Amino acid sequence: MKRWTQIFKALANINRLKIIRFLSSGEKLHVTDIKDEIGISLGAVSKHLIILHNLDILENCGKDGHVFYFLNRGMPKDLRRTVSLFLNKK
């Protein structure tokens, strides 16, 4: 129950949902790219990314001194289904 409380709290933030939707393209994106798309400060984006990463919604990798974020393809199925509810499927 505690896990789902944390997940729903994380998904209750519009900026985190925007980040998830933006990263749903499958690309690996830098924090600055996400900041520019979402339109919030770099510090705020970083905090949101940490929360999503800690819940295994996002993964990251470093390259040339930069960190790139992307959706975790290995997230548990129940979490993947929940996250998919917030993505634009057209």
Image (cartoon, helix red, strand yellow):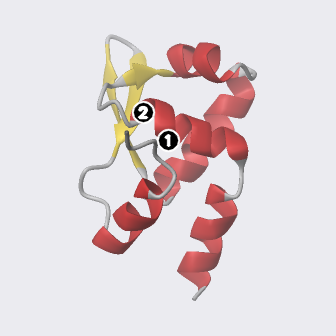
Which kind of residue does numbered mark 1 sit on?
Ile
Question: At label 2, which amino acid type do we have?
Answer: Leu
Q: Position of residue 90 (x, y in %)?
A: 37, 39
Q: Is residue 71 left or right of residue 3?
A: left
**Residue at figure coordinates x 48%, y 49% from the top left:** 53
Picture quarter with the N terminus: bottom right
Classify residue 66 by image quadrant: top left
Badge 2: residue crowd in 10 Å (few <14, some 14–19, many ≥20): some
Identify the residue position indicated by label 2 in the image: 23
| Label 2 with label 1: CB-CB less than 8 Å | yes
Query: Mark 1 sits on what residue?
Result: 20
Instruction: Name the spot of residue 68 as percent of width and height, x first.
Output: 39, 25
Q: Above or below — where is 49 with respect to 30? A: below
On screen, residue 90 above or below 12: above
| Residue 67 visible, this angle | no
Callout 2: SS: helix
Q: Quadrant of residue 36?
A: top right
Res 77 visible: yes
Tell me the SS state at disc 1: helix
What residue appears at the point 55 percent right and 22 percent down from the top-left corner?
Answer: 34
